[in-house]
Image (cartoon, helix red, strand yellow):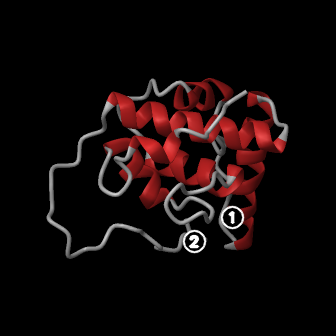
């Protein structure tokens, strides 16, 4: 995505470790996405519509033809929120971050897609359970 900026929290000098999504990490990320959607007052269907509009605008802005499958389906949004996706899709995750703008629990800024992956992997510093205690999804 052209709007992507890389403001990753994890320092490249930190020890590298295998990247595996954990159930806890996916659930934490899903809870954050759902809380952000609720903050905006959107239904899952409205989120589908908003992601479609955002991605269409990116294609139009770059003078590219708009594919038929832009946006994220309501079913996929729901699976992300429930932490039920074993393989997180970069495009979908980026769209959700850019449209919903969940707050990064470490930086208190809008969550960058790279940092969302760190949450899903429970990579330091995103592995501290205290970071997620105040996030509500209702």
Residue 41: image quadrant is top right
Q: Of residues 16 and 57, which is closer to you in this image?
A: 16
Q: Residue at x 73, y 72 (%)?
A: 61
Can residue 103 be seen here? The reply is yes
Q: Residue at x 25, y 74 (%)?
A: 12
Residue at mark 2: 2
105 relative position to 25: left or right: right
Q: Of residues 70 and 35, which is closer to you in this image?
A: 35
Q: Residue at x 52, y 47 (%)?
A: 93
Residue 114: image quadrant is bottom left
CB atoms of marks 1 and 2 within 8 Å? yes
Can residue 49 be seen here? The reply is no
Measuring from the top left, give residue 52's x and y in whole percent: 73, 46
Measuring from the top left, give residue 10's x and y in whole percent: 33, 67
Q: Secondary structure at mark 2?
A: loop
Q: Which mark is residue 36?
A: none
Residue at mark 1: 58
82 relative position to 85: left or right: right
């Amino acid at each position: 995505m052209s709007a992507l900026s890389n403001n990753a929290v994890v320092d490249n000098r930190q020890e590298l470790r295998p990247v595996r999504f954990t159930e806890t990490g996916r659930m934490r990320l899903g809870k954050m996405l759902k809380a952000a959607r609720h903050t905006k007052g959107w239904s899952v269907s409205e989120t589908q519509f908003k992601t479609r509009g955002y991605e269409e605008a990116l294609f139009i802005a770059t003078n590219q033809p708009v594919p038929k499958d832009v946006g994220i389906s309501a079913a996929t949004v729901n699976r992300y929120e429930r932490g039920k996706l074993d393989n997180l899709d970069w495009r979908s995750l980026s769209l959700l971050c850019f449209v919903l703008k969940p707050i990064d629990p470490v930086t208190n800024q809008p969550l960058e897609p790279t940092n969302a992956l760190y949450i899903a992997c429970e990579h330091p510093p995103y592995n501290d359970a205290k970071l997620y205690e105040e996030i509500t999804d209702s």
